[in-house]
Image (tube, rainbow, N blue to C red):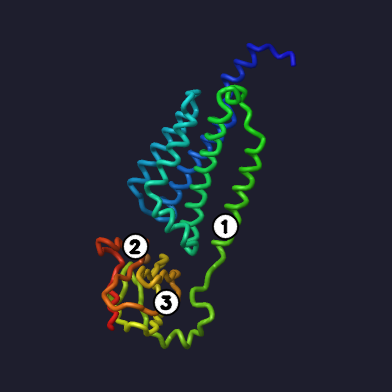
Amino acid sequence: MSTPLAVTRMQARRRLPTLRKVMIAGLVGNVLVNTVLQGLILRTLIPPLVIILALTLVVAGICATRWHWAPHLAVFWCVLSVVPGLEPYYINLTHPAETGTFIATLLGLALLLVTVVAGGAAIIYGDRQVAEGRAPRWLGGFLIGLATFGLGASLVAAIPQDAAAGVSSDALSTLPALTTKDFTFDQPEIRAKVGETVALRLDNADTSMHYLDIDEFNVHAPMPSGKRSIALFKPTQAGTFTFYCHPHADKAAGTGMVGRLIVEP
Ligand SMILES: [Cu+2]
């Protein structure tokens, strides 16, 4: 190679190292995905998330500089922005029936993982590699693997689920119903007896997905919009419990889509 050293240095100064580009792509991609999630899927702004996204953009801007500690900062920020608020991630990823939210959450986390891996590589390989602008060979394979996994999970989540599959509509019609309309349950109270199986027909008259959640009896029945579904459970203890729809209720405060399940001995 007869390239003069001075030219190589100048080129290196102009071009941003590949690892840094990948880190920025992960951060900006995460902001875009979460913006789509709030604007088009949830149709509501989540103030803490908006602040996190603004700071994520700031971190992406810092990655575009040649500051030595930028990869450390990016990795630290990715962990800090997710770990203290894990619960919504857990809820979204364990409810694939809400396909849009599931895919957006998965994609957002995958993009942060890309930033963590690229940032980690930039830290491990150090400034020499960063100055040369090359990315490690395995990075391409990692990105393809992650994209394949994300696509596979999204396709599985997108398969329409019939929540009342295997139940004839005649049998379903005879069951006591719990209806959701205008983001409320039509009954504030359901009664049951210990040890007796409860079979409820769930009618969702809204255009939004709802759930019937009763934590104590591990009930998390999806209620697809405009459809009938079923909840089947057997209360094992007497008492008064809360039933609610987890995306549209604050269970602790007792506000939103909540009601009482009274189990008699
Ligand atoms: Cu709901």
* Apparent side of residue 140 relative to residue 203 in the rendered image (left or right): right
Could you give the CA–CA distance between mark 3 and mark 2, rounded to whole angstroms? Answer: 18 Å
Say if mark 3 contacts mark 1, CB within 8 Å: no
Q: Position of residue 154 (x, y in %)?
A: 56, 57
Q: Earlier in the sequence, mark 3 or mark 1?
A: 1
- The label number, if any, that marks residue 231 in the structure image: 3
Could you give the CA–CA distance between mark 3 and mark 1, rounded to whole angstroms? Answer: 26 Å
The amino acid pointed to by label 1 is: Ala
* Apparent side of residue 124 relative to residue 254 in the rendered image (left or right): right
| Total count of labels | 3
The amino acid pointed to by label 2 is: His
- The label number, if any, that marks residue 153 in the structure image: 1
38 to 130, vertically: above or below: below
Residue 130, picture quadrant: top right
Q: Earlier in the sequence, mark 3 or mark 2?
A: 3
Residue 41, picture quadrant: bottom left
10 to 209, vertically: above or below: above
Q: Which residue is mark 2?
A: 248
Q: Position of residue 239 (x, y in %)?
A: 27, 76
Residue 217, picture quadrant: bottom left
